[in-house]
Image: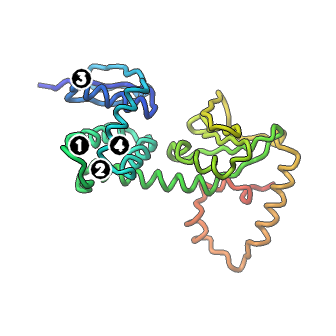
Amino acid sequence: MNQQHTILKYDGSFDGFLCCVFAVFEQKLLHPIIRKESEIDQELFTTTEIIVTEHLKAQRVWKSFKTKISKRQHTNLFKAFLSEIKGVENTLLKYIQYIFQQHKTTAINYSNKDILTINQVAKMVGREKHRMEAFVRFQLTKDNIYVATVSPDFNVLPLITSHFKDRYADQKWLIFDTKRNYGIYYNLRIVEIITFDSFTTIDADHYNEKEIDFQKLWNVYYQHVNIESRKNTKLHLQHLPKRYWKYLTEKIDI
């Protein structure tokens, strides 16, 4: 006899995912499957429930979870969620269920396949975070806002927000993820989440008059310090993969 699964649909946010976890424990669901609302259901013998995101419920789950594990582990769970790998929510759910089943806080059991998977995925997301922090290049617009566009493999904007807020606290800036169609905007006070219907790159017509001169100057400087006789293409690509070149002023022909 087939066991009926319950598919929990959520809005794709981390709070929404935590509300799904809340529903699993509250309803004592035996065979839950968590999915984004945008995903299509193809299984037979299932029921579907739409989970409404409620901040208080999400905070209850997150606060309880954090009391049972280290800061590193709950950070890794969040990073793994941001990977957006298909089905990652269900791996995270199994991990959370495992942690809550423990009677007291224990050392992390890396022989558990879900824990191992989460930590491996978190490392991948962490590497992408550091690369975005290193390779993001801003362009000054006529509105005196520094704008950068990115399209990272993983949804790392929530992870790089504090880095750029601290580093560029005296400037208005916007980093827009063209793959996910949202951005983070710092207005000299707070960082806000913004969305646009269509946003790709900054047209040269919108540059501040100083921006093109600066880009040319930087390009000339880069060409002069790039000593041809010492060029090591293999090592260069190892430290600076070609997929990141589109972000770099020194790699753009001006």
The mark nearer the N terminus, 2 or 3, is 3
**Residue furthest out toward the bottom:** 229
The residue type indicated by label 3 comes to Gln
Placement of 96 over or under 127, stated as above or below: above
At label 4, counting other C-alpha atoms closer than 10 Å, the crowd grade (few under 14, some 14-19, many 20 or more) is few
Colouring style: rainbow
2 or 1: tag closer to the N-terminus: 1
Q: CA distance from mark 1 to mark 4?
A: 14 Å
Q: Earlier in the sequence, mark 1 or mark 3?
A: 3
Q: Nearer the viewer, mark 4 or mark 3?
A: 4
The CA distance from mark 2 to mark 1 is: 9 Å
- Establish if 187 lies above or below 121: above
Q: Position of residue 252 (x, y in %)?
A: 74, 55
Q: Earlier in the sequence, mark 1 or mark 4?
A: 4
Residue holding disc 2: 115
Q: Amino acid at mark 2?
A: Ile
Query: Which residue is at the front of the view, 39 or 60?
Result: 60
Image location of residue 198, percent across then percent down: 66, 30
Cα distance in 3D space between marks 2 and 3: 25 Å
Q: Which residue is mark 3?
A: 27
CB-based contact (under 8 Å), mark 2 and mark 3: no
Q: Residue 134 location in percent, x, y?
A: 61, 57
The residue where tag 4 is placed is 66
Query: Quadrant of the rendered structure where residue 148 is?
Result: top right
**In front: label 2 or label 4:** 4
Spatial separation of the CA atoms under disc 4 and disc 3: 22 Å
Q: Quadrant of the C terminus?
A: bottom right
In percent of the image, x 43 and y 34: which residue is there?
14
Q: For numbered disc 3, what is the local secondary structure?
A: helix
C-alpha span from label 2 to label 4: 15 Å
Crowd rating for badge 3 (residues with CA inside 10 Å; few <14, some 14–19, many 20+): few
Which mark is on residue 98? 1
